[in-house]
Image (cartoon, helix red, strand yellow):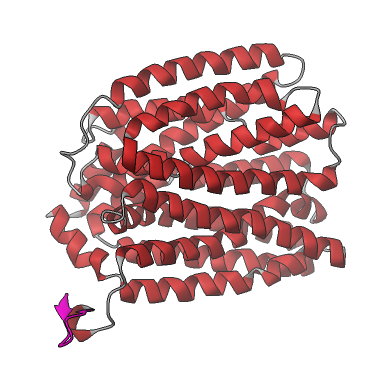
Amino acid sequence: MTQTSSGHDAGPAGGPRAWTPWRTVFAFGLVSLCADMVYEGMRAMTGPFLGSLGASALTVGLITGAGEGIALVLRLVTGVWADRSHNHWRLTVLGYAMTAVCVPLLAVTPFLGAAGLAVAATLILLERTGKAVRSPAKSALLARMATSTGRGKGFAVHKALDQVGAFSGPLLLAGVAAATGLIWPGFALLAVPGAISLLLLAQLRRRAPIVTEPELETATGADPAAPASSTLAAIGRAVTGSDLPRTFHLFSVAAAMMTAGLMTFGVISFRMVEDGLLLAAAVPLVYALAMAVEAVAALGTGHLFDRRGSRVLLVVPVLVALVPLCVFASQLWLVLAGVVVWGVAYGIQDSTVKAYVADLVPAPRRATAYGVFAAVQGLGALAGGGLAGALVTGHVPVLAGVIGGLQVAAFALLVHVTRRRTGSVQV
């Protein structure tokens, strides 16, 4: 970075002046806000849309399940890819572009006749692949950007903006569907926030030289021209996790246990409607409430994380243990209170927890670590989904007991992990 004659920072080689750390974090949050409008809007309507194209319930489950599996497990490879190639920005842009393009293209599938369902399924899986491509690289970039702001606050602000998109996207799709009686016009409209996300990302890339590829490359000290066999060996180490700290693995297991206890909103809303507590048309409003709560929780706990340290995470298993006791009650007010608790726990899981991952691993391995962490969390989500699906009908006390046991174990692991000092980790 150079300086102008007035003493202000300028970009590399006299390029655009660099933004401040807080401005770069906020801009990255706006990118995620727009992108979340696109893919959360899609996810809110995927089931009904595929059904309108002729998919059965089983087909919908297979397509959406495969998509979530791709979005999580593929990060094992894309995280290593980002660290080995130093192409954090390129992978981030590619991943966001896949979302911005694939979701609006769903609008044409109703006009493709018999091929419509297959094309729609392909686009949904490609969008989820884009999520896997960008997530580890994006998190590593964000961890670098938030070094000066405080990682807890940086990840929290990013998550809060992210959640604005997460609840506004589904509400936009619901509004368009209500006004037109059709789903596909909403997908076409999502091309607008998708394009804005890419324009913002291009501007951010020009204005954030604090996290350019050369800097990350210098940090890793790795050879970008390493042979393929070396890259394959790195991928193998990432899958086994042999080159990451033991405390990181313990923390990942604790996070997986907490994730297993947080049933998906689909399970919660299914019970609300089935028990006659809520009309199906009101479900998006409750989901929007949960998304808003997530944003507030991320901001609050991120600030506490920077001031009080990692012990703030000990509240998560306590919250998770309370969720099944509330959301499966027979009183609507208690169910809604449970949804609020669910939103708080999810907000911490997806912001402050990620900030702590950056403290547990050295900077050159962060994208790899985020990939491994997501895969372990994915296994927890898969186990939790199966557990909830098997016990939510007729066996809620057993479900609550199993989740409570998992949270006791998660709490014990967190107590052990958070005793370590984080100041020695490379930033």
Magenta: predominant secondary structure element?
A: loop
Q: In this rendering, would 311 be left or right of 419? A: right
Viewer-proximal residue among 251 and 52: 251
Spot occupied by residue 150 in the image (x, y as percentages of width and height): 31, 50
Q: Is residue 400 left or right of residue 117?
A: left
**Residue 52 in view of the camera:** yes
Residue at 30% x, 68% y: name it. Answer: 20
Find residue 158 and report its horizontal and vertical position in percent. 45, 55
User: Is residue 277 a member of the stretch shown in magenta?
Assistant: no
Q: Position of residue 208 (x, y in %)?
A: 30, 70
Query: Left or right: 136 with respect to 167?
Result: left
- Above or below residue 354? Residue 126 is below
Q: Which residues are magenta?
A: 1-9
Residue 383 in sight here: no
- As for residue 3 lying within the magenta part, the answer is yes
Q: Position of residue 365 (x, y in %)?
A: 24, 46
* Residue at the (48%, 54%) spot, across then down: 131
> Looking at the rendering, in which quadrant would you find the N terminus?
bottom left
